[in-house]
Image: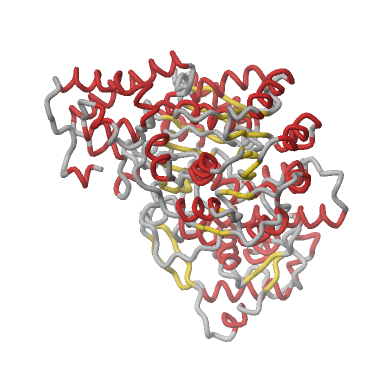
């Protein structure tokens, strides 16, 4: 059996996605690989297909218990024997799994990094042929990554203990250039095939909103998206509990997740969300790592996250099936203070030196500033994200809130000049609050204490509001006319580029939205993203949508019988393709995206029977437009 036969038989696809075949071929040649691919790009296929063709066992190292369970369930549903080993199993269960693996029952074993150094696992690894070690969430091995895990350093030592060095493959969805270099260096990848398919998720609509009442905005948004599955992230447990109670009063099927809940309650709540019993989840960032739920239609951030890496990872849990989905961040200036408090409260790693801890804190402060700039920029949000991850976008996306707003440009060169003069006059000893207060001529006690009234720049922008001056300063920071010190004090400094403003060779343009800066608490009934991105189900006509709902009900019933999440059986994308193709026999069903031979053997006849009952076994067009367009 070759790679194409495996792809079709087990996964139900006729061809590989961009980049998958390159990495698969490299692994089959015995070459190390590194794949940096966005969520939903099909990273798992890149190691699962070669795992079935290589002679020995493939170990997949992952920190995410929920993802291991999901992946193993999905593989077993597809007819591939796989197992996982982590703290959720008893020692007896782990021993049994290792015995079966040694007998060749499992080709793929998912394992937590902490398990690699246990005596039992080391004995097992020394007795079997390990063809490949796959490192999932590879950014966790880098101290410069947003989610460094010291346990990941055990992987390097584990590989050294093996009699024969296996192929090492590593995958992540979010990595800056520095983190990518760190992954290669720390893991010791040898002449790796490196693939960066890009970080863009074209099906996602990005927005930053500033509602007067965040809880009212969230309530109205959820009510205007009935039946959709979504995640609402909050920075604190208190906000999670408040929003959870607020939504329950509206009889919204909602659940919650944070570290303050008991382990059993967290497990049950997560299961209710995955199984669509409670399709709306309110959670802290403790939730979501490894959640493979494909039909999340929106991710709302009630508070600004601490970094763009965290935001893109959390927002990326929307639309894993490729369908149009929304990622909306609700911003307020207080979010910065909350995040700074959380950084101050962060548990310190005792293994780090004082200098290392200082460097980590400065890095965290820099990430927080970059995240804050994202919330303030009036340029394309998608372009901002992609540039951060090292991609250069030549044009605006047309599918974010900034691209869909109208702005008026004002020449604020003179104001920029006053700001630069003020920072120079204050000798770069103060942050944005003091500088802005000085410029507008504020008389508060702190400024009196600093004696800023004696400076020539005091009150030089008295006709502007302090908030307006801060907006201009933030834009000047984004345009690198100014910079700040890499610590929590963030003292403002002037850059070399500011000389161009001072000598008149550069103008400074400030954008002002035509609409009021604050949004209404009630979002539009119709998704803002539909003008650019449509869901695949939008191609179905009324009868097609009726069949789609019947297939969804059947899928839910089968999922309950099998005790697996509905998306493990078939994704929404597969159900829509069933409605478009309306197969009436096995040959037709096997042409549906995501239906392989093993999935057909388990579920094919039930879905065929439902389609036949609906169509009477006669060909019927259940979609708009032509077939190619519909697909």
Quadrant that contains the C terminus: top left
x and y percentages locating residue 168 in the rendered image: 64, 50
> Which of the 4 image quarters holds residue 189?
bottom right
Vertical relation: 421 (above or below) 162: below
Q: Nearer the viewer, residue 320 or 41?
A: 41
Drawn side of residue 495 relative to residue 314, left or right: right
> Which of the 4 image quarters holds residue 409?
bottom left
Q: Nearer the viewer, residue 291 or 233?
A: 291
Can residue 224 be seen by looking at this rendering?
A: no
Drawn side of residue 317 relative to residue 444, left or right: left
The tally of labels here is: 0
At 71% from the left and 75% from the top, the residue drawn is: 424
Drawn side of residue 178 relative to residue 254, left or right: right
Can residue 502 be seen by looking at this rendering?
A: yes
x and y percentages locating residue 521 in the rendered image: 43, 37
x and y percentages locating residue 46 in the rendered image: 50, 46
x and y percentages locating residue 69 in the rendered image: 57, 28
At 48% from the left and 21% from the top, the residue drawn is: 564
Tell me how the rendering is colored: secondary structure
Q: Nearer the viewer, residue 299 or 109?
A: 109
Q: Residue furthest top?
A: 561
At 76% from the left and 58% from the top, the residue drawn is: 487
Quadrant that contains the N terminus: top left
């Amino acid at each position: 059996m070759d790679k194409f036969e495996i792809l079709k038989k087990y996964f139900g696809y006729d061809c590989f996605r961009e980049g998958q075949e390159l990495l698969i071929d490299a692994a089959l040649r015995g070459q190390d690989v590194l794949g940096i691919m966005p969520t939903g790009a099909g990273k798992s296929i890149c190691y699962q297909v070669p795992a079935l063709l290589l002679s020995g066992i493939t170990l997949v190292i992952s920190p995410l218990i929920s993802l291991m369970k999901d992946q193993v369930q999905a593989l077993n549903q597809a007819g591939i024997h796989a197992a996982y080993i982590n703290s959720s199993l008893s020692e007896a269960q782990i021993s049994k799994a290792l015995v079966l693996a040694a007998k060749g029952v499992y080709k793929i074993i998912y394992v937590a990094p902490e398990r690699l150094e246990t005596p039992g696992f080391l004995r097992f690894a020394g007795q079997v042929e390990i063809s490949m070690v796959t490192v999932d969430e590879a950014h966790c091995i880098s101290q410069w990554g947003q989610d460094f895990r010291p346990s990941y350093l055990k992987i390097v030592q584990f590989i050294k203990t093996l009699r024969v060095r296996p192929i090492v493959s590593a995958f992540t969805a979010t990595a800056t250039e520095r983190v990518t270099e760190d992954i290669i260096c720390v893991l010791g990848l040898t002449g790796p095939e490196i693939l960066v398919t890009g970080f863009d998720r074209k099906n996602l609509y990005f927005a930053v909103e500033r509602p007067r009442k965040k809880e009212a905005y969230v309530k109205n948004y959820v009510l205007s998206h009935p039946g959709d599955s979504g995640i609402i992230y909050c920075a604190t447990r208190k906000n999670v509990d408040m929003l959870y109670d607020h939504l329950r009063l509206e009889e919204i099927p909602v659940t919650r997740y944070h570290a303050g809940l008991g382990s059993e309650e967290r497990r049950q709540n997560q299961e209710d969300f995955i199984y669509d019993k409670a399709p709306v989840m309110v959670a802290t960032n403790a939730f979501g790592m490894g959640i493979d739920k494909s039909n999340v239609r929106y991710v709302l951030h009630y508070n600004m996250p601490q970094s763009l890496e965290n935001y893109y990872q959390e927002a990326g849990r929307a639309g894993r099936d490729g369908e149009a989905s929304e990622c909306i961040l609700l911003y307020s200036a207080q979010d910065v203070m909350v995040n700074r408090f959380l950084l101050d409260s962060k548990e310190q790693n005792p293994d780090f030196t004082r200098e290392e801890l200082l460097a980590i804190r400065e890095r965290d402060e820099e990430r927080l500033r970059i995240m804050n700039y994202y919330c303030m920029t009036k340029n394309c949000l998608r372009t901002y994200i992609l540039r951060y991850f090292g991609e250069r976008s030549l044009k605006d996306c047309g599918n974010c809130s900034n691209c869909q707003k109208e702005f008026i440009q004002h020449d604020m060169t003179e104001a920029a000049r006053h700001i630069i003069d003020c920072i120079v006059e204050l000798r770069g000893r103060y942050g944005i609050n003091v500088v802005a207060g000085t410029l507008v001529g504020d008389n508060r006690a702190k400024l009196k204490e600093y004696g800023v009234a004696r400076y020539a720049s005091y009150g030089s922008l008295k006709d502007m509001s302090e908030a307006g001056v801060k907006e201009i300063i933030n834009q000047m920071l984004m345009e690198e006319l100014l910079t700040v010190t890499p610590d929590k004090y963030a003292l403002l400094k002037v850059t070399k580029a500011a000389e161009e403003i001072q000598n008149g060779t550069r103008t400074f343009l400030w954008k002002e939205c035509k609409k009021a800066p604050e949004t209404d608490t009630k979002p539009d009934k119709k998704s803002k993203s539909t003008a650019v991105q449509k869901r695949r189900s939008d191609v179905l006509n009324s009868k097609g949508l009726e069949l789609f709902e019947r297939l969804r009900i059947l899928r839910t019933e089968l999922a309950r019988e099998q005790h697996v999440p509905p998306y493990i059986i078939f994704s929404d994308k597969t159900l829509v393709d069933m409605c478009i193709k309306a197969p009436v026999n096995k040959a037709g069903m096997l042409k549906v995206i995501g239906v392989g031979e093993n999935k057909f053997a388990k579920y094919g006849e039930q879905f065929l029977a439902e389609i036949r009952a609906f169509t009477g076994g006669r060909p019927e067009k259940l979609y708009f437009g032509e077939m190619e367009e519909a697909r």
